[in-house]
Image (cartoon, rainbow, N blue to C red):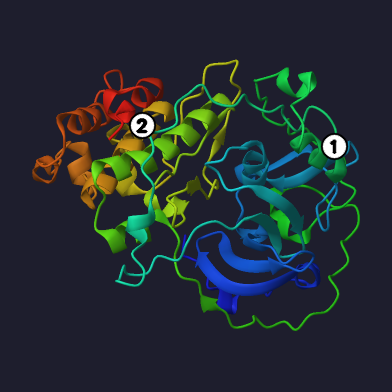
Amino acid sequence: MSAIDPSSSPPPGSFFHTHYQLEELIGSGGFGWVCKATRRADGRQVAIKLIFKNRMARESIVRARWEASEGLDMWEDGTIVLPLEAYILRQARHRGVVEYLDLFADDDYFYLVMEHHGSPWLKPSSHHHVGSIIPIPSPPSPPLTPPTASFYLHSLPSSSDMAAQASSPRSSEMMASSSHEFPRISRPTPIRRSSALNSLSLTSLEPKPQSTTMARSMPMMRRSSSSDLFECIEQHSHFNEPTARFLFAQIADAVYDLRKRGITHRDLKDENIVVDAAGCVKLIDFGSALHFRTSEPVSMCDRFFGTVSSASPETLDKVPYHPFPAEVWSLGVLLHILLTGSTPYPTRHHIRRAQRNRELNSKLSAAANDLLDQCFAVNVDERITLERLCDHPWMRMRS
């Protein structure tokens, strides 16, 4: 699917402009675009993903218990229609994941409001050498924070209740369940329905009124300086092992915690990780993420989600594959790029034949090479598990 051109797309609606000041374009893709904005209420900088409703696939939309918000379609049973990405991101509460802040909609878009994180990665110079200020502590280690309760099981608390809960220990109710049942898609009668979602065969009882008028032309935006890990590595060539370990340990820690919450990202790559000048990394873009019940075996995936250069051999064979070993392979690709500045398998041909350029690894420690070899085992039964990866000797080194 071709990337969306924001300049020729419908402009954000009036609710957006009432509450947010559009600043810069961060990026665009096949389903929408992301901008940096300022929240008018408190001046906070946020990232807002505008998801085109008419480009959304059926499986990317769910109904769940959710608080009412501007433009979100509500059904008679009290459930709200929303992007699966928003549902997943709100449950992915971890220091290594960008924070969910808000969700609203209009006739054209879902607006997913998130924490804006990361530093603009300019070329290091005598005045601004970003790499020199990245700290190198020992990596965090499991066990991690327990999973939160599923949002669809009960009505969500009010904003004030959630704020109070965030500042106090989790209640026993919130700690009670670690299994996440996917929201049921029965078909009660909708009481509001967006015309942009009519192609998903959900009937509307009454047309939704048009948003109040705004000039139907897209405001000009300058492109924001990239704050993703890809650009960070581009500007620093590669990292020494202690710095790479510090960055990679945060990524593995976040992936480990997501797994315990019933979430697998399915598109781990340097462009989906943002990093600030202190070396604090956070995962972004959960548009391909899978949500599963932790109390049951995870279903095999029958389609490939993600980027070819980060894909494992089994995901390219067009046969059902298990998402967990595939995720470990992608983590290995990330680690290789951090250490060498180069992708280990540049093409499908190299991936399928497991042809890796080992010359780039000649300067790495034996422990680093061992971890990479275990991540890149072609046989999924021989590939290192995420738990063993987090406890690998290289991950526990202090220098």
Q: Given this view, does label 1 or label 2 mark the residue nearer the observer? A: 1
Q: Is residue 335 visible?
A: yes
Q: In the displayed structure, would residue 175 be above or below residue 289?
A: above
Q: In the depicted view, which residue is nearer to us: 389 or 133?
A: 133
Which of the 4 quarters of the picture holds residue 210? bottom right
Near mark 2 (Cα within 10 A), the count class, few <14, some 14-19 or many ≥20, is: many
- Identify the residue at image location x=76%, y=46%: 81
Which of the 4 quarters of the picture holds residue 231? bottom left
Q: In the displayed structure, would residue 40 be above or below residue 80?
A: below
Q: In the rendered view, does 379 fall on the left or right side of 83?
A: left
Q: Amino acid at mark 1?
A: Pro
Question: Tag on residue 157?
Answer: 1
Residue for badge 2: 328
The disc, 1 or 2, on the residue closer to the chain's N-terminal end is: 1
Near mark 1 (Cα within 10 A), the count class, few <14, some 14-19 or many ≥20, is: few
- Horizontal and vertical percent position of residue 249: 39, 36
- Horizontal and vertical percent position of residue 46: 64, 61
Q: Is residue 322 visible?
A: no
- Horizontal and vertical percent position of residue 271: 41, 54
Q: Quadrant of the C terminus?
A: top left
- Identify the residue at image location x=73%, y=30%: 184
Question: Tag on residue 399?
Answer: none
